[in-house]
Structure formats: structure tokens, C-alpha cells
Image (cartoon, rainbow, N blue to C red):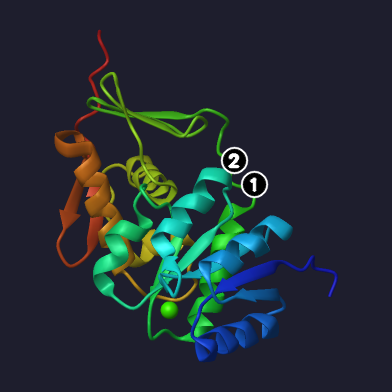
Amino acid sequence: MSQQQHTILVVEDETSIATFVAAYLRNAGYGVRTASTAQNALVELASEPPALIVLDLNLPDGDGVELCRRIRKASDVPILMLTARDEDVDKIIGLEVGADDYMTKPFNPRELVARVKSVLRRAAPERRRGESEELRHGDLAINSGKREVYVGDEEIRLAPKEFELLWELLDHRGIVLTRDQLLERVWGYTFAGDTRTVDVHVRQIRRKLGDASPIVTVWGVGYKVASDRTPAPTA
Ligand code: CA
């Protein structure tokens, strides 16, 4: 295999889970390092930055959310959070924490490997759409090159996946995209799965954009942006 080996840092205090996750990742061709406390994780990070971090939310010496925030201040390394509770999801993937994805325990290790692959693929600097393309919708302006979102004069900060989801929907104005299609396009999952991820992100976008949010729910199917709010060209 000539493929460059990525190293994953697994931060998890439950030995059985850490061992299990490490085994699956190694089988998939990744190098794996582990840390069982937040403190060890910081030491590992300082010694050699990994390609991705799998981070447990509940650590013996601190909160994974706090650790994630600390890491985010210094680094863009992709983070996949592990959580035991579904309620934490909004917080984890929101901008205030900035994880790239999450999984709720108990999880299927094959799915974890699939998500690691997809997060790494997304993190690779291949995602370069037409340098600085801008889409407008009513008061909303979104710029793909600068990754900026404005409502009127006010800049709105979106988490990376929120941005990509909004872009995808705006870029397909008037067309319904199913949750599975959105998962595939934004997260790159190859098998149908956790469509709740899409709903959570849509909810965050709506909260942040308020009345300016263009996303319409098409019940039982997915989401779309109506095609009729683009400002009419002035004669
Ligand atoms: Ca734990």
C-alpha cells in the first residue's frame, strides 16, 4: 500500500471501547495512538498532531467539550466526538464547540471507520469550488471562497457543516434534496444512515439565520430552498 498512513488519536477512558475502536481503525489501515485522559490527549497533541481525533465526551479529568474547544483554538484538526447522550448533539456540532461529526454510543465500529474516512476526505484541501462564488437569496449572501454568510450587513458565523449544507441547498434552489442526498453530498457517507444529523444542522442554521433562513421543510422527504426569493434584476 503506497497510501500515506494517517494517524488517528483516540481519546477514550473506557479501555474496552478504546481497544475496540483502535483495532477497527488499524484494520482499516490507520495508525492509532490512544489517550485515556484530557491531559494525556493534550500531551499527545503537542508531541505530534494526528490527522483526526476521536474524542469521548466524558473523560475522567474533564469534559470532552471543553477539550474540543481548547483544541479548536489552536488547530483545525478534524474531530469526531463520541457521546453517550443524544441531547448533547446540538452543542457538540455547533460552532461553539466545532466538532466535525459525532457518534452516539453504542455505535457500529464499521460506521465509525466510514465516518473517519469521510471526515478525512472532507478535510483534504480538494474542496475548492470556483474560487469565490457567491449565492444570494433575499437578504442572505453566502460566499464559498471566503466561507462567509451575511444577512444584510450582519455576518453570521456558521459551523463548517452548516455552511456546506446551506450552500448545497442554495445551490439547488427549487429542488428537494432528501436527507440521504444531503448526508451524501455534505458528509460523504456512502451508506444511508443517521439522517438526524441533517435535521440537527438545519435546526442550527435556522436558529442562526432567524427570519432570513431560506430552508423549507418538505415533510417526510427532505429540505429545499424555494426558488422565488432571489431579488429581481432591476430592469
Ligand atoms: Ca468516557
Q: Percent from the top left, x then y, of residue 188? A: 50, 63
Residue 54 falls left or right of residue 94: right
Judge whether residue 167 can be spotted in this image: yes
Q: Amino acid at mark 2?
A: Arg
Q: Quadrant of residue 201?
A: bottom left
The answer to whether marks 1 and 2 mark residues whose Cβ atoms lie closer than 8 Å is yes
Quadrant into which the C terminus falls: top left
Answer above or below: position of 64 versus 172. below
Given residues 152 and 159, the one toward you in this image is 159
Q: Percent from the top left, x then y, of residue 185? A: 45, 57
What residue would you read off at disc 1?
A: 125
Q: Percent from the top left, x then y, of residue 37? A: 53, 72
Quadrant containing ligand 1 reads: bottom left
Q: Percent from the top left, x then y, of residue 1? A: 84, 75
Q: Quadrant of residue 232?
A: top left
Answer above or below: position of 96 versus 112. above
What residue is drawn where x is 51% and y is 61%?
A: 79
What residue would you read off at disc 2?
A: 128
Q: Marks 1 and 2, how far apart in space?
A: 7 Å
Q: Amino acid at mark 1?
A: Pro
What residue is drawn where x is 30% and y is 65%?
A: 89
Residue 158 falls left or right of residue 25: left
- Element marked by disc 1: loop
